[in-house]
Image (cartoon, rainbow, N blue to C red):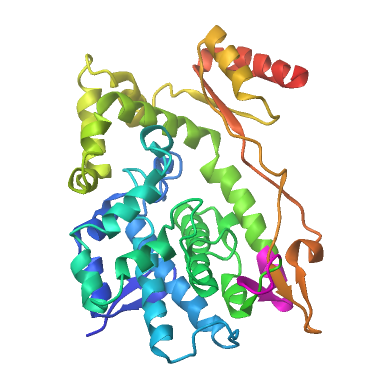
Amino acid sequence: MHKKIYDRVHGFIHFNELENLLLSSIPMQRLYHIRQLGVAFLVYPGGTHSRFEHSIGVMELATRIYDQVYQKPHQLMPEKGSPEYTYWRQIVRFGALCHDLGHLPFSHVAERALLDNEGHEGWTRRIIQSDYLMPIWEKLDPKRDVAGDVIKIAAPPPDSEAHDTPWERTCSNMITGDFFGSDRIDYLVRDAQATGLNYGLFDYHQMIEMMRVLPALDQPDTLQLGIEENGLESCEALLLARHFMHKRIYKYPAVKAYAYHLEEFMKKAYSMSRILESVDSYIYMSDNEVLADINAARRNVSHPAHHDAIRLLQRKDHIAAIPIKEQLSKSALEALAGKHAFSFEHKEPKSSHMTMPFPVLLRDGSIQEGTQLSGITIPRTDVSWVFVEQDKRKQIAELVEKSCRHS
């Protein structure tokens, strides 16, 4: 029996019986109560959409990508219509639905401080292998390691050889890929629609229509998601969408300030050892429980996170979040913070610009890297941040700027 949900971004999305079981499971239902954009709704009131709707959107887009690349399949891909083709199509759909199961309340806001190096992906892997979901995987094929394959696609362990074949790696990139991943495509478009900031809207229909599985640029005997030459402009539009959405939402100073207060609240209010004790205790927590606790802390002057609760719920005198646009070492920031009593978030420097490092199939049949074909240069928005009380904002900003000039 097939069912459908109407999604405001992609229209009707259809599900089979096993997917409906997954959607009805406790870990998936929890995503209804975790905001996709964390505390950004305090700045952009429309940004209240959930991880649940994002996850079904990712499944829809990943399926479109899977079906599209089979219009002109590569010889290393399973034959269309074969059992392997059908199996991996289902695994991609499962993986898309499961890729965000391990998020803490309010998504990324407090994960950097409260989770270990595995982050929410580690908890995604635990939940996929939990008793909540194993019966569903066994219904698909009791003879295969379905849970392991879903993990390969949705949340492969870092620095591991999780993928046994080039095709498995390609399937994972349909969801998690840095450029063509359906996760990124959906959140840019969905976040833009929800907040009204149209910077994130781009022609993803054209992009998906032009997607191909091509020989990898660095290893021609393996596979990589790429694009036909006619789709290059849609890729450039995606780069611009990423840049402006990061500047206007994800790394917007007011949003970063409220995220700081929520992170501080969660560090002060909760015993993380208890929350991280088991899958059961972990998935018990959602935005609802945290908001109720914030409201209680607001009314309790002796609560260790009372002042953060006031700043979150009454939007009163929130901290100033100052981006550091020039690179400053972590040790230099620590020295300044120790002397002038402020908090900071340090980001290690990456390449100075976002590029398009994927294969492009030209009209003459040759393949080139996208970066060589595009004249667009997009600066990265990965910067460190200083968090300081408003009355010290100007003083600390000048000190940091001076330190950057002399570093």
Q: Does residue 234 belong to the magenta stretch? A: yes
Viewer can see residue 102: no
Q: Position of residue 201 (x, y in %)?
A: 57, 62
Q: Residue at x 54, y 53 (%)?
A: 197
- Quick check: 402 above or below 135? above
Q: Residue at x 67, y 62 (%)?
A: 237
Q: Position of residue 379 (x, y in %)?
A: 71, 46
Viewer-proximal residue among 220 and 398? 220
The quarter of the picture where residue 32 lies is: bottom left
Q: Residue at x 29, y 21 (%)?
A: 305
Q: Residue at x 53, y 13 (%)?
A: 391
Q: Residue furthest bottom?
A: 81
The quarter of the picture where residue 273 lies is: top left
Q: Quadrant of the N terminus?
A: bottom left
Viewer can see residue 165: yes
Q: Is residue 367 left or right of residue 109?
A: right
Q: Is residue 207 left or right of residue 124?
A: right
Q: Position of residue 141 (x, y in %)?
A: 26, 78
Q: Position of residue 97 (x, y in %)?
A: 35, 65
Viewer-proximal residue among 363 and 257? 363
Q: Does residue 357 belong to the magenta stretch? A: no
**Number of callouts:** 0
- Quick check: 395 above or below 156? above
Q: Residue furthest top?
A: 339
The magenta stretch spans which residues?
218-235
Q: Quadrant of the C terminus?
A: top right
The quarter of the picture where residue 204 lies is: bottom right
- Quick check: 349 above or below 74? above
